[in-house]
Image (cartoon, rainbow, N blue to C red):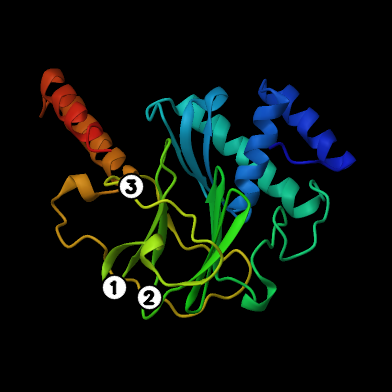
Amino acid sequence: MQQQLTPAGQNIVNDLSNRYNLSQDAVIYMIGAVSNGGGTMAQFNCPELGGSGQWMQGGMTMVGDMFNYGLKNTVNNLCAEISNALANTQIFPIIKAGTPGSSQWWPTDLGIPFSSGGQNNIRYAVFPNRIAIESNGQITVYDTLDHNIGGVSQQQGGDTSLTFSSQYGTIAVSSLPIISGAGNVPPPSPHVNFAQPLYNDFATPAPIVHTPVFTEPHNVQNDSADTIIQLIEKLAKLRDSGALTEDEFNGKKVELLGRL
């Protein structure tokens, strides 16, 4: 469902669409993605920008074609402009806090989250002892028990399940006790991409214990997509230096990509 825009927001969409040679629908979609990420990050799946990708403020950009640096630069510049516009312009009409469609969609009694984000039809917000999930307009609040949440991950593609990392490893959100709501978040699939670090979107974060999720560091299948990309870039340097042949490099790259 396309979000409504203010007149100022429509002007921004027109300008970005013309300058980046994108459809207005693609620009509106990316504005929603950056808005869901609190203005500091975005997860997206936009065919006009190469499909699935991730942007984080400060220069960390991932696209489907990992070596297409021109596309990375386009995504980075577009998202940076959108982030600035969101901070200085009322792009979307103001919707009452605590209602679906609002930028503060979670129940107001939870207060201010120390992290929030989302993609497609799922958004999350993390609070002390609680995590709120909005899925297809339905809000569910879960008890996080004694978990120290260190990151939230969302599966790319058709399965949009959520997991989070804690001192106990990788945990499915759907396995937590439900405080309120229908609990309509789908269970996780075996492979999760684009791990999201917690970002301070609204206020000073509560203390978080960051504990490594993966107990087997050499199991590449458990690594995030950005880690695999870093490994491929290192292999490319070894190839360029003559330490690896082109065939050896290509074989290893295919193996790594197959683990995403």
Relative image position of residue 155 (x, y in whole percent): 39, 45
The amino acid type of the residue labelled 2 equals Asn
The amino acid type of the residue labelled 3 equals Val
Disc nearer the start of the sequence (1/3): 1
Disc nearer the start of the sequence (2/3): 2
Residue labelled with disc 1: 167
Q: Residue at x 36, y 44 (%)?
A: 193
Residue labelled with disc 3: 192
Q: Residue at x 79, y 52 (%)?
A: 88
Q: For numbered disc 3, what is the local secondary structure?
A: loop
Dot 2 and dot 3 residues touching (CB under 8 Å) = no
| 41 relative to 62 in the view: left or right | right
User: In the image, which disc is placed on residue 148?
Assistant: 2
Quadrant hosting residue 241: top left
Q: How many angstroms separate mark 1 from mark 3 (CA)?
A: 18 Å
Q: How many angstroms separate mark 2 from mark 3 (CA)?
A: 20 Å
Dot 1 and dot 2 residues touching (CB under 8 Å) = yes
Q: Nearer the viewer, residue 108 or 49?
A: 108
The amino acid type of the residue labelled 1 equals Gln
Label 3 Cα crowd, 10 Å radius (few <14 / some 14-19 / many 20+)? many
Q: Nearer the viewer, residue 245 or 83?
A: 83
Label 1 Cα crowd, 10 Å radius (few <14 / some 14-19 / many 20+)? some
Q: Residue at x 68, y 37 (%)?
A: 1
